[in-house]
Image (spheres, rainbow, N blue to C red):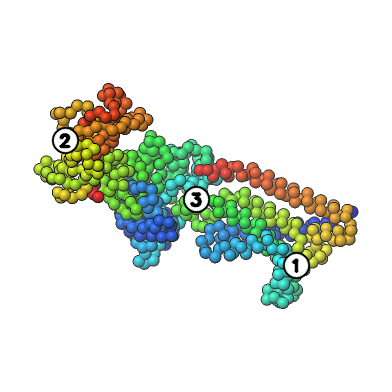
Amino acid sequence: MAIDWQAFRLTIELAVVVSAVLVVVGLPLAYWIAFSRRRWKFIVEALIGLPIVLPPTVLGFYVLVALGSRSPLGRWWQSLTGHTLAFTFTGLVIGSILYSLPFAVQPFAASFSSVDRKLLAASATLGASSLRTFCRVVAPLSVPGLVAGIALAFAHTMGEFGVVLMVGGNIPGVTRTVSIGIYDQVQASNYASANAMALLLLVFCFAVLTLVYGLNRTTLPQATANRKV
Amino acid sequence: MPTPAEPRLPETRSANPTLIARIRKTFSATQRPFWLNVDFSAAPGFTILFGPSGSGKTTLLDCVAGLTPPDAGRIVVGERVLFDAGSRASIPVAKRAVGYVLQDLALFPHLTVEQNTEYGLPHLPRSERRERAAVMLQEFRIEHLRQQRPGEISGGERQRVALARALVTDPCVLLLDEPLAALDAPTKSKILDDLRTWNQAHRIPILYVTHSREEVLALGERVLVLEEGHIVAQGTPHEVLSAPLQETVAQLAGFENIFDATVESVHENRGTMFCQIMTSRVAGSQEDRPVLLETPLIRAEVGSLLRVGIRAGDILLAIVNPIGLSARNVLAGRLVSMERRDMMICARVDCGVEMEVYLTLAACDSLALAKGREVWLVIKTHSCHLMRR
């Protein structure tokens, strides 16, 4: 019974990087979705939500094509670095970001939307810019949604399989994540190893989510109690 | 352009900043198209915007604050142009320096009273911010609540926090949207006193929106009456509420009896005139006689159509034909119905037209009133309020 610790380290690394990028990318995107009055907003929303319904292999396939040397993006990257993005950790990160985007953006946007618009109006009349309003009013009142979004993105990235396999393949130490490692072990009929890794992943994901929702529970009642003002 | 970050001193605030606004705004997207069309000015001190809900009061405030862009018009405070459709000028909300206490206050629930109050002063160094907030909290008597959050304090206290938060930024205009609607009268008047004291030192125009007649009378300042997006009357509360020109205002102001009438004769030497109430009753139900009322004199010609409003509480009821009264109108009639409303009786009397009269329980008992009884109604000339139709 062998546990592929390398795969574990890689998976956690991937999940941390992806979650961090999703916070940076997801916050402005969610803000735009929550507050923009553009008529075509729904198209962007549908686009962002696509990975929820799309088979991971479909998404992974197109990401692979886009990163490959036949696409402008892939060629540009190749001319810059000398190698393609496909089957690299960076490629994996890009694929995972797209795949987990809705899991971060949707809870973010939902919690931004639930902030009373009158608070935003009050903030503006008190001289605050949109950025200040966001930092001082919108974000603090959205903490539960932000935490939920980050937790979902993290856990979702930890467990992904299809996109990783399509984009990253199965290179130990570079792109082999836990879920692919488990698949490998099952293919090789090493059920004991597969079971050990699967159980570990399960316990880890459960622990992360428990921690996050537990923390949220302690902040949530306070936030809602104050919101009735 | 000066930002609210800089102390707003003479260059942005003239000595006597008067708010002068001409606002046109149409909403056609909503189910009921709405057209706001107002021209008014508000000198330093209170100006009350009075009108029923849906009359455009909040929209008007939103336009002044910059939260809603008017379609056309111009909004100026002193020398400062906040909005001008002609030159396409519009100072963004955050830079208008308009204090706005929204209808449900919109205090930041996650910040303490002190943090709420300091919110508009991020440009100041921390110590000065603290100090200005402290002064303001003291002026509004809430310094002991500094560390509390809005969810932990009473409605009146929250109101004070909202005022302190808006005023600490030293705005050039203050907008109050039904700020005291939910408070009891003593709390209300204490807060108003503190606000008046503050404004004696600062002298800025305060637009105060309300739909409460009591509040209008209590404030006792200039009133603009807004209806369906138009200013239909303005003046002192007495002028606007005691002799309203529009019937909807009259209903708001508590006239239970409103009748169509024509001017029968004008007696300029006596300062009164006679109006005949138009009866719409079926002929023969009682002796058909015109109901004549002696009313105060207004500028109207014989034959012109008016409305007369009489408060149910202003009418006396007698069980014998009274004599030797100063009151000019004594109408004979019959008691149609009596209905108890809380600690008061609401009687309806048919005297050619049906009138509603309020009586105390004691009066009702001692007169031994009963349905069908013959009674006389006594109405003073000045209890008859005339309005245009």
- Chain under callout 1: A
Q: Nearer the viewer, mark 2 or mark 1?
A: 2
Residue bearing mark 2? B328
Specify whether B103 is left or right of B389.
right
Q: Nearer the viewer, mark 1 or mark 3?
A: 1
Residue B113 horizontal/vertical position (percent) = 50, 42
> Do tags 1 and 3 sit on the same chain?
yes
Mark 2 and mark 1: Cα distance apart in space: 97 Å
Q: Is residue B6 visible?
A: no
Q: Furthest-left residue in view?
A: B269
Q: Tell me what residue is drawn at x 62 percent, y 56 percent.
A: A106
Residue bearing mark 1? A167
Specify whether B157 is left or right of B44.
right
Residue bearing mark 3? A119
Q: Tell me what residue is drawn at x 32 percent, y 54 percent.
A: B230
Mark 1 and 3 residues: CB-CB less than 8 Å, in contact?
Answer: no
Callout 1: helix, strand or loop?
helix
Mark 2 and mark 3: Cα distance apart in space: 57 Å
Query: Is residue B82 depicted above or below B267 in this figure?
Result: below
The residue type indicated by label 3 comes to Leu
> Do tags 2 and 1 sit on the same chain?
no
The residue type indicated by label 2 comes to Arg
